[in-house]
Image (cartoon, rainbow, N blue to C red):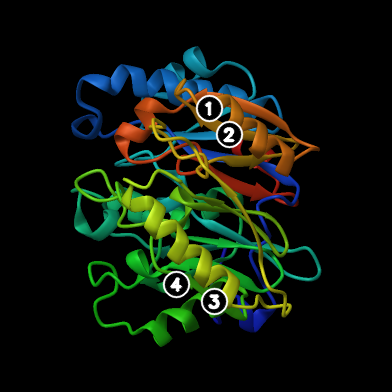
Amino acid sequence: MSQAPQTPSALGFAMPAEWEPHAGCLMQWPSRRELWGDRFAQAEQDYAEVARAVACFEPVVMVCSPGKAQTVRDLCGRGVTPLEIPINDSWARDSGPVFVRDAAGSIAAVSFGFNAWGNRWHPHDDDARLGVTIAERLGLDVFRAPFVLEGGSFMVDGEGTVITTEQCLLDPNRNATWSREDLERGLRDHLGATTVVWLPFGHSLDVGPAGTDGHIDGVAAYVAPGHVMLEAPTDPASIDTVRALENLAALEATPDAQGRTLRVTRIDPGAEAGVSLANHYLANGAVIVPVDGNPDEGRALAELGALHPDREIVGVPGETLAFGGGGPHCITQQIPRGVDLSVLGG
């Protein structure tokens, strides 16, 4: 394992889309008790249920604090490999590595800066090192990006487009000295993108101690190249109804890297939904989506299923994950096919 001397883009690497085939899925076991409070045991149970659901479709590597491997085995069962590494928290999408691939199929990792969502939580030094540590364990070259970026704050189509939110990336609590243009260059250089589409907002509730300042995966998800699912409430009393219309306008106004006007499918999660339908994970052959039993859930899940007719829709408990600040997408990170997970043992 060596540190790559140039940016991923300069060497022909780009991040594959989430719907492309996976070697497996990376997760982190709950660790920060002060986040979960009296829900800590429930968080463990729900992380385990997500891991078991994903493991029906692809292997899961569960990073856990030293001494927790047996707990992971006991609660998660077969198909989930515990990997003991010091960690502070449990959001693999944000603190874990991002994987990139070149035209020859070689895989490398990108480790972005991590400051626990604008220094909300301390300590976070173990999580800040996690991208490099995972790359070392997998024997991959690693690119060290010179700016803070969480995986939940952007999404890619694998064809040159990255979509993000102004609310999150332009918040000075991440990269105070970086301009919008600096951030666009950083995204292009490290994700292999050519076009950045900016949405104004994430979800209105994505603030406060457990918030992320407007991650994209709380409001939108790629379905396929040129096609985006947008969580769009219709309740006139909801601020997110207004925000969704502004996000829709931004999506429709900005051509993607291939010159396409993005097709946007709007799904209303329902006025009583307490989870983000957009915060789902595309496993091999499945959509792992949070549920909470709200009255509109069946209709919303059916609409999501119509967008993914070749995937099984698998509901997992979402209420406690939402309490912690996220959903299934936030606690997972896809590992593209071509990475040898056998080096981790199991």
Q: Is residue 127 above or below residue 198?
A: above
Q: Residue furthest top?
A: 74
Look at the numbered disc 1 and give the secondary structure of its residue: helix
Q: Residue furthest front?
A: 236
Q: Which residue is at a point 27% across and 21% down the rendered structure image?
A: 39
Residue to which mark 3 is pinned = 196
Q: CA distance from mark 1 to mark 3?
A: 32 Å
**CB under 8 Å between callouts 1 and 2?**
yes
User: Could you tell which of marks 4 and 3 lies nearer the N-terminus?
Assistant: 4
Q: CA distance from mark 3 to mark 2?
A: 29 Å
Type of the residue with mark 2:
Ala
Picture coordinates of residue 112, whole percent (x, y): 43, 65
Residue to which mark 2 is pinned = 300
User: In the figure, is residue 259 to the left or right of 5?
Assistant: right
Look at the numbered disc 4 and give the secondary structure of its residue: strand
Mark linked to residue 297: 1
Q: CA distance from mark 4 to mark 1?
A: 39 Å
Foreground label between 4 and 2: 2
User: Could you tell which of marks 3 and 2 lies nearer the N-terminus?
Assistant: 3
Type of the residue with mark 3:
Val
Picture coordinates of residue 90, whole percent (x, y): 37, 38
Foreground label between 4 and 3: 3
Q: Which residue is at a point 51% across and 28% down the rendered structure image?
A: 296
Residue to which mark 4 is pinned = 145
